[in-house]
Image (cartoon, rainbow, N blue to C red):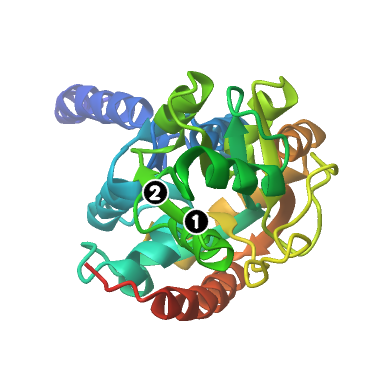
Amino acid sequence: MSFSLRHLIGRVLPVALALSAAFAATPSLAQASTRILVGFPAGGGTDAIARILGERLKDELGAPVVVENKAGAGGQIAAQTLKTAAPDGHTLFLSHDHSITILPLVMKNPGYDPAKDFVPVAGFATFVNAIALSGGTPATSFTAYLDWVRQQGGGKGAVGIPAPASVPQFLVQEVARKNGLDLITAPYRGSAPMMTDMLGNQIAAGVASIPDFIENHKAGKLRVVAVMGTQRQAAMPEVPTFAELGLAGFEEVPYYGLFAPAGTPQATLDRLATAVQKAIAQPDVRDKLTAMGLTVGYMSGEQLGAREQAYGKVWSRIIKDSGFQPQ
């Protein structure tokens, strides 16, 4: 080997080895971690769902999945965070209907437009909202609760809700209107702090999702007395629907899904959607989510988007009929 060739190899080889080491230390797209934004505090139903799904997605994606709670404003902060995230598939927003459908209907400027700023990745479940009574509330049924409000407060009472201008708020307003009561809503920053007050008997009743209530309902610490939807829930078949109790109009059930920033490449969306589909097909994931009161079922990004639009039409009418003015 000539001196010049040995000299060239001596200079190039260290550089090549350094570059090789650098590339080896840099995670690939599949290996880089993914964060799932949740718009509510740790300890609530949405947070628990995100952690169950995230644990399995970690296996399907072959990379760490981290749940990041961006609590406040009914999920608005988390949604705004998603809007500004890089469209690379490594930041997702796990949300139900409130942040995606309801907030844009009740706010003039929520700081994001789901139709322009987000793209649906996949849906994985539907659920229902319900009204529950605190352990210290003597009523044991929905009808008995209404009678108790009339007797104790002359028709006045307070009902906790996880966020203002939400489906629970409009449900409480409709219950009050149909029964001639003066029920006011007490908004919280998510279901977890509301549950704390309910368990401490600081508030007599609350409206939230079945996943928020089910554990304490089964433990007898509070009582779910009515659910939304067209049929009773498998997780609590003893509880009647609002329609059964004469309160029609709340049959359309909300959804859970994952959303990515607009501009995320289709190939990345497809990879994520496939991971979601495989994750919820696993018996342990399905069983855990079902036990929380969810109806588990895969929806493609296109199907989730269609569900979002249909749900928005229903609630746009309900909100308008309530007389609520966007803030």
**Quadrant housing the C terminus:** bottom left
142 or 126, which is in the foreground?
142
The residue located at (73%, 49%) in the rendering is 296
Quick one: SS at disc 2?
A: strand
Q: Amino acid at mark 1?
A: Val
The image position of residue 304, as x and y in percent, is 58, 67
Total marks shown come to 2
Q: Is residue 43 left or right of residue 68?
A: right
Circles 2 and 1: CB atoms closer than 8 Å:
yes
Crowd class of label 1 (few under 14; some 14 to 19; many from 20; radius 10 Å): many
Quadrant housing residue 37:
top left
Q: Looking at this view, is 154 or 50 the one in front? A: 154
Residue drawn at point x = 52 percent, y = 65 percent: 174
Q: Is residue 147 left or right of residue 28?
A: right
Question: Helix, strand or loop at disc 1?
Answer: helix
Please indicate, yes or no, whether residue 42 appears anywhere in the rendered image. Answer: no
Image check: 112 left or right of 148? left
Vertical placement of 266 versus 225: above or below? Answer: below
Mark 2 lies on residue? 185
Amino acid beneath label 2: Thr
The residue beneath circle 1 is: 172
